[in-house]
Image: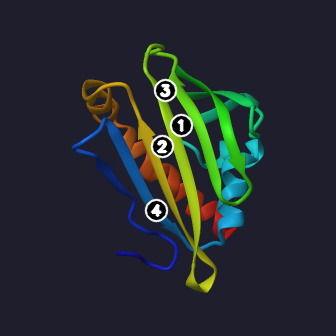
């Protein structure tokens, strides 16, 4: 399943509700993984697939804050925005997520972190959308490869 710094990213579509669950382990404590998700200077270094440049317009990761960022790939720009509903340091981020190319599709996302033995951690993220069709379109968009590649990039950042 893993080498010294790369772990499998599990992405599962729930058959009962329009939800995607992502589970990933990291060879770093949850505080470090949390910081990589909340510090905009770190987020731009790992988020998204390889070959994609991330640019943050604003990123106020606190309860009541909001964000907007753009991924640039082969000259095309893709915007994303949302609101942070609950942020608990090194533990939980609850946020909305909207891809601006499909503005009616708002997902409610929950990211939880837990400690594992040996200074490691596990991330569990869920993304709930408004319909099974929306969920399936989300999965068909190639987001799974972007998530996997992004977490591989995060592995390298955490190791550095």
Q: Secondary structure at mark 3?
A: loop
**CA distance for labels 1 and 4:** 21 Å
Q: Which mark is residue 49?
A: 2
**CA distance for labels 2 and 1:** 6 Å
Extreme residue in the left direction: 15
Viewer-side label of 4, 2 = 4
**Given contact means CB atoms under 8 Å apart, are the residues at marks 1 and 4 in contact?**
no
Q: Secondary structure at mark 2?
A: loop
Q: In the drawing, does residue 14 fall left or right of residue 154?
A: left
Crowd class of label 2 (few under 14; some 14 to 19; many from 20; radius 10 Å): many
Residue underneath mark 4:
24
Residue underneath mark 1:
52
**Given contact means CB atoms under 8 Å apart, are the residues at marks 2 and 1 in contact?**
yes
**Given contact means CB atoms under 8 Å apart, are the residues at marks 3 and 1 in contact?**
no
**CA distance for labels 3 and 4:** 28 Å
**CA distance for labels 3 and 2:** 12 Å
Crowd class of label 4 (few under 14; some 14 to 19; many from 20; radius 10 Å): some
Query: At 51% from the left edge and 55% from the top edge, which residue is drawn?
Result: 151
Estimate the x, y position of residue 111 in percent, counting from the top left.
Answer: 55, 50
């Amino acid at each position: 399943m893993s080498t010294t710094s790369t772990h499998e990213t599990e992405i599962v579509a729930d058959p009962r509700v329009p939800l995607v669950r992502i589970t990933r382990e990291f060879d770093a404590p949850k505080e470090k993984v949390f910081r990589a998700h909340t510090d905009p200077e770190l987020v731009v270094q790992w988020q998204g697939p390889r070959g994609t440049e991330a640019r943050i317009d604003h990123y106020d990761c606190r309860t009541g804050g909001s964000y907007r960022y753009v991924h640039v790939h082969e000259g095309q720009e893709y915007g994303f925005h949302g609101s942070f509903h609950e942020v608990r340091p090194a533990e939980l981020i609850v946020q909305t997520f909207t891809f601006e190319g499909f503005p009616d599709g708002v997902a409610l996302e929950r990211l939880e972190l837990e400690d594992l033995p040996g200074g490691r951690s596990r991330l569990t993220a869920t993304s709930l959308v408004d319909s099974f069709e929306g969920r399936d379109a989300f999965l068909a968009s190639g987001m799974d490869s972007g998530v996997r590649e992004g977490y591989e990039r995060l592995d390298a950042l955490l190791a550095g």
